[in-house]
Image: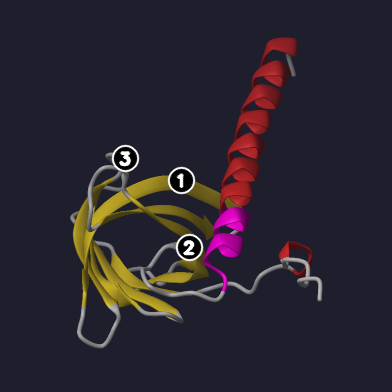
Amino acid sequence: MSRLLRLSLLIGFCGLLSSCLSYQVRFDKAVAAAAGKFDNPTGAWKGTWKSNWNGHEGPLWCIISETPGKPGFYDFRYRAGWGILQFGNYVHTLEVAKAPDGSFGLNGKMELPKLIGTHSLEGSVNKDAFEAKYKSDKGDHGIMSLRRPPMKKEALPAPAAK
């Protein structure tokens, strides 16, 4: 293997590792920020996706945050897995409507790279669950099911002094 090829592979691996670590840092911060409250869908969510089209499935992570300067809109930042791969870091901005039961309805579209196509999403988020159906203009369709992950023990706030 030539030195140039090895160097290229090393740079690519470092870039992928950096992307994964950066997402994990944001995810851990979102877990801590949303702990014990629910007045909007913000925070970290972890679960699975499953294609009803081809049977593929894998882990799914999502960080939901308010879209700066757009009241009522939220950014959904996804990372997905399939086999040993983790991919994504796609941001999907959706208008979110609060329902009478306190949940938040989701409905929107997201442009992904050409091979993946445009995905539409329809679902809801409540204090415990994020459930949605997705559909691609390339034929894929399936479900996403996520829950709020527990806070890591080291992320718990120190008890107040008496």
The image shows residue 18 at horizontal and vertical percentages of: 64, 35
Tell me which amino acid carries mark 3.
Pro
Seen from the viewer's position, the closer of residues 135 and 158 is 158
Q: Is residue 30 magenta?
A: yes
What separation in Å lies between label 2 and label 3 (alpha carbons)? 25 Å
**x 31%, y 73%: residue:** 132
Magenta stretch: give its range: 27-35
Left or right side of 38 for 14: right
Q: Is residue 69 left or right of residue 61?
A: left
Neighbourhood count class around disc 2 (C-alpha, 10 Å): few under 14, some 14–19, many 20 upward: many
The number of discs equals: 3
Q: Is residue 111 left or right of residue 9?
A: left
Residue ID for mark 1? 89
Q: Is residue 149 magenta?
A: no
The span from disc 1 to disc 3 (Cα, nearest Å) is: 12 Å
Q: What residue sits 68% from the left and 30% below the top?
A: 14
Instruction: Return the disc, 2 or 3, that comes first in the chain's sequence.
Output: 2
SS majority, magenta: helix
Q: Is residue 116 above or below residue 144?
A: above
Q: Amino acid at mark 1?
A: Asn
- Packing grade of label 1 (10 A; few <14, some 14-19, many >=20) is some
Q: Nearer the viewer, residue 142 or 106?
A: 106
User: What quarter of the picture does the N terminus occupy?
Assistant: top right
Callout 2, which amino acid? Gly
**Which residue occupies 38% across, 73% down?**
39
Q: Quadrant of residue 28?
A: bottom right
* Image height of 104 relative to 140, above or below: below
Q: Which residue is mark 2?
A: 43
The CA span between labels 2 and 1 is: 15 Å
**Marks 1, 3: nearer the viewer:** 1
Do the residues bearing badges 2 and 3 touch, measured as CB atoms within 8 Å? no
* Residue behind mark 3: 113
